[in-house]
Amino acid sequence: MPLRALLSVLLMCSLTTVGAATAHAAVTGPGSADTAAGQAAGASTADAKPAVTVSARQAGKGGTITVKGTGWRPGTLLMMLICGRSSPDRGVIGGTNSCANADGRAVTTGTDGGFAKKLPVAEPPVPCPCVVHVATVTGEQAAADAVFVVAGHPVAALPQNTGGGRLAVLAAARLEGESGILTWFGAPPARRLVVTVGNLGTSPVENPVFQVGTAHGVFAPQWEERQWRGTIGPGGKARVELPVELAAGAHGDHQVSLKYGGKVLAEQPWGVGRPWGVTLFWILLCLVVPAAVFRIGMAVVDKVRPRTSHAPARARRRRRGRPHAVPRAPRRAPTADRDPSTAPATPAALPWFTPDSAPDSAPDSVPHSAPSENRPTTKGHS
């Protein structure tokens, strides 16, 4: 009896396990298998290394080749260029200054991390060996090169590699310096890129040549060579200062990159303010120039218009500034020479000298005015 009960329990456990597995398979269905496959494919794409192939290894200027890529991040914007003085193992020596930038093409990767795009063949500004250089524009930096020969383009040997020295950044890079008053009026902003590097190789590095790149927004960096004078021994470190300068009137968000030996060592953002002095200058110019033109135009009109039509107005304007002249009374001729017939009528007497106002007690024989000089006075005479 106990043995039969034990067998019954084991049979029930087996049936329960089989039922649970069947139910899980029914719930997940075939879609889960597809999701798992997609996740595996995404993982393989993320682990894959970016690679580039070309449809032809050699072509002349004016032709067209097809560039294909695999292993890139999905939905990434890439830039394709034909660069000289380059090799897949050493990269593009000289940065984008060694590439035919005017004939480059942009492409966006698909969901599988691949792409296919036609690229016109152009001659780079430096001699070959040449490569088709593909690099990311935004996001995490990645690059890949494919050997390519531009038919008819000069070929020169690559510069010698500098021994076994290998530099690495030991401290975060920073920008030092301040903008002056001239930068507010559009002068080129300038800073110093300060970074501490160490030599991880087995041989000293003498007078290393760095590449400093400046980029605005989503555009690719523009690289310039900067040589640092000094020697960094094996296991040693040094503080490196390199000048960085933007174009005149530059403003907005920029990014400064430091490259050595084809590898980017450091990146530092740089926010540049707008040159408001230039804006103020244009505002003043828009106000002063129209006012000056208006004044010149009015002067010209005043010179060429007829004088007769506005002569009274000008005369009135001239008289406004002068004091009013007091009119003079006409000169009267002497009394002896005047003729009574031609003498003017006697004006009316003033109110305060009317006969009514004279005192009644005064005799008529007494004169009311002072004696004349021709009439002697009685004072002092008998």
Image (cartoon, rainbow, N blue to C red):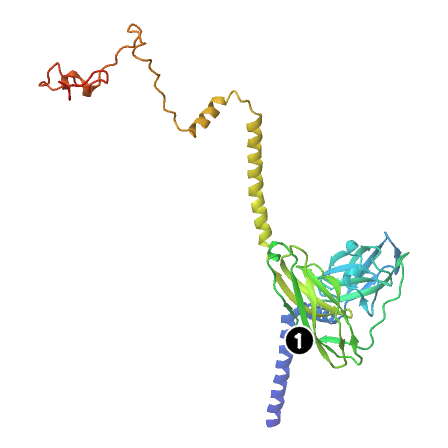
The quarter of the displayed image where residue 351 is located: top left
Residue 105 percent location from the top left of the image: 76, 56
Residue 294 left/right relative to 261: left
Residue 243 sits above or below residue 117 on the image: below
Quarter of the image with the N terminus in it: bottom right
Percent of width and height locating residue 197: 71, 75
Q: Residue at x 74, y 58 (%)?
A: 107
Residue appearing at x 75%, y 59% in the figure: 79
Q: Nearer the viewer, residue 260 or 112?
A: 260
Numbered disc 1: secondary structure: loop
* In front of the other: 65 or 201: 201
Q: Is residue 75 visible?
A: no
Mark 1 sits on what residue?
171
Q: Amino acid at mark 1?
A: Ala
Furthest-left residue in this view = 361
Q: Among all residues in the image, which is located at the extreme right?
A: 152
State the image quarter where residue 338 is shown: top left
x then y, percent, for residue 50: 77, 67
Q: Is residue 187 left or right of residue 151?
A: left
Residue 57 picture location, percent across and down: 88, 61
